[in-house]
Amino acid sequence: MIKETRVYVTLNGKHTKHYENLKYEIPRRRDKWGSYGFVQGTQIYVKIEDLPIKSEVIVTKICDYCFGESPCSYVTLIKGRQYIAKDCCDKVECVGQKIKEVNDIRPINKRRINDEKELEIGRSLSERFPEIATQYHPVLNKKPPDKISYGSDKMYWWICRDNPEHIWDDSAKHRTLGDRGCPFCRGMRINHTNCLRTTHPYLISEWHPTKNSEITPDNVSFGSLKMTWWLCPICTSSYDMPVAMRASAGQNCPYCAGSRVNETNCLATFYPELLREWNHELNIGATPYSITKSSAKKVWWKCSSCSWSWEAAPESRTNMKSGCPKCNSTDGEKEVMVALDKRNIKYKFQYSFSDLRSPKDYPMRYDFAIYDDNKNIKYIIEYDDPYHFKDERGRLHKKTVEYDKIKNEYCEIKGIKLLRIPYWDFQCIDDIIEKIHST
């Protein structure tokens, strides 16, 4: 029997119509599109007899044999009444008593008569599968394991060798030829020994209190692939994730990890000072609210000082504190820009090729890429400061020489003209640009 007469049910799209047909009042509100609908997580108080047969709402089951109380999903309780309208707990003596009553009222069918035939030598469960025979329940089954066929389709009771509270019914054929083990250990059936509340109690505090409809930590296992809702204790975000991903794979809040974006981890929340340099014209489909502060995806920025537009990943602006490359350029680079702008030469500052990488797999950039009228690269310009030639910065000088060599070889292989302007030609930059532009 069921202890409660009414229970709270969390509404979902599947059962809402069922309760409306029973004249229950479903609270609704208008959404931003003008349609009326119920709010996700809404609960109503319903009578037990009005629950759908497949409802997974948790009720308190009272054993009709020992009168003990235990939580149970409504659908499981109804399935248990298939042959006799009585409920029992997981105790061996109660299960045995119910099986006896069921066997007394069920008709004897042809398969059961055939099971009474004498087995051939070597066909019994004990002889062919002695290991599985040790899991054959000694109390709940009428026959001993040496009297049943290892290939029988008849249902028998089994007890788990690892946990005596795991008791289930299955055919001998499935156990032997199908190699099926304990369904509770595999998470295919649920009871108090293997539900999420028992196996992973530390996750219960993060279980969303309203969004999981009739799924609870008591009727789902740690290996379930059901999509459930969680509430992050750190950023307070709600997110959906299969139980197995949280319990077995050990994954946590995707917003804290940066794999999803909301108001708790977006760029706008953590670095509002960068909003003034977000290039709204070039960042089509992206906003500071739709990208994380540590994203490696390149976006466009517009310098608040010089109005220069450039591409950079948010992580480089937040973690490495990079700013406008034009404002941070050297005196020589600025002089080259002046000469190029004066002649209306099309160029891109700090240009990188996708297949040009450093020994540590970082993108390598040239100072200037000069374009022709067809927007193809005409030549490359590099301005070399003193540290390209003198060992003034220790290891940095060696690294610069190494990178210059890689850049030179890349242009040679690709057939791209490369112009290097050394620092001692600083006063001649305008003449150099004029000469190369006129050729």
Image (spheres, rainbow, N blue to C red):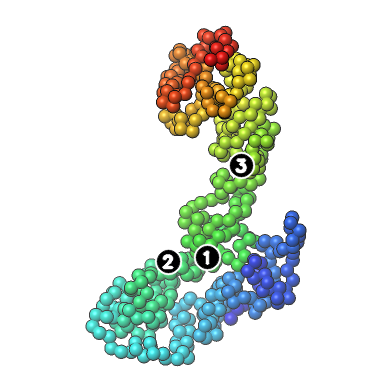
Q: Secondary structure at mark 3?
A: loop
Could you say which disc has been placed on residue 220 in the image? 1
Seen from this angle, which residue lies furthest left? 121
The Cα–Cα distance between marks 2 and 1, rounded to whole angstroms, is 13 Å
Q: Please name the residue that numbered disc 2 is placed on.
A: 185
Please tell me which residue is depicted at 53% across the width and 78% down the height of the picture: 79
Closest to the observer, 375 or 418:
375
Please tell me which residue is depicted at 68% across the width and 72% down the height of the picture: 17
The type of residue carrying mark 2 is Cys
Q: Nearer the viewer, mark 3 or mark 1?
A: 3
Please tell me which residue is depicted at 60% across the width and 38% down the height of the picture: 293
Residue 137 in sight here: no
* Horizontal and vertical percent position of residue 154: 38, 82
Please tell me which residue is depicted at 52% across the width and 19% down the height of the picture: 381
Q: Secondary structure at mark 2?
A: loop
The type of residue carrying mark 1 is Val
Left or right: 6 with respect to 187?
A: right
- Report the number of numbered marks: 3
Q: Residues within 10 Å of mark 2 (few under 14, many from 20)?
A: some
The Cα–Cα distance between marks 3 and 2, rounded to whole angstroms, is 42 Å
Could you say which disc has been placed on residue 170 in the image? none
Q: Quadrant of residue 310?
A: top right
Of marks 2 and 1, which one's residue comes earlier in the chain? 2
Q: Please name the residue that numbered disc 3 is placed on.
A: 291
When the figure is inspected, residue 251 is found, relative to residue 405, above or below; the finding is below
